[in-house]
Amino acid sequence: MKLIGSSASPYVRKVRIVMAEKKLDYRFIEENVWADDTTIATSNPLGKVPCLVMEGGEAVFDSRVIVEYLDTLS
């Protein structure tokens, strides 16, 4: 699993805290959504972070939805 986001985002921090508490293995990818070369739209059509991308390529976005999904794991 990979989490795409910005370290400055409180929504990304919320997801990272939940992932740390649940001891989930993931890769964090820093993304500046305001940069001209941003690639977030390939995973999230809204162009917002955080975005959780599964191994199969499915994406979950919105911190509340991501946290609810993570709560179903382990």
Image: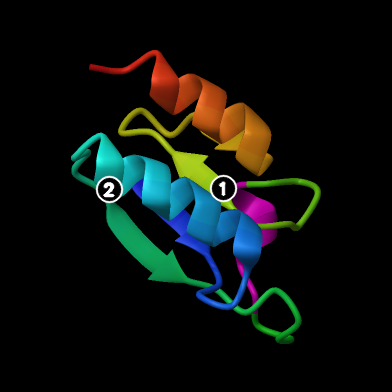
Which residue is found at the position 59% from the left and 47% from the top? 43
The kind of secondary structure element at disc 2 is: helix
Tell which of 36 and 28 is nearer to you. Answer: 28
The quarter of the picture where residue 23 lies is top left
Q: Label 2 belongs to which residue?
A: 20
Residue 59 spot, x, y in % from top left: 54, 34
Q: Quadrant of residue 9?
A: bottom right
Disc 1: which residue: 51
Residue at x 48%, y 47% (from the top left corner): 15
Identity of the residue drawn at 23% across and 17% down: 74
Q: Amino acid at mark 1?
A: Cys
- What segment carries the magenta color? 38-43
- Residue at position x 27%, y 48% in the image: 20
Is 71 positioned to the left or the right of 74 in the image?
right
Callout 1: helix, strand or loop? strand
Q: Is residue 8 magenta?
A: no
Identify whether 58 is placed above or below 1: above
* Quarter of the rendering occupied by the N terminus: top left
Q: Would residue 22 be seen by someone viewing this image from the given angle?
A: yes
Few, some or many residues within 10 Å of mark 1 (<14, 14–19, 20+): many
Q: Residues within 10 Å of mark 2 (few under 14, many from 20)?
A: few
How has the structure been colored for display? rainbow
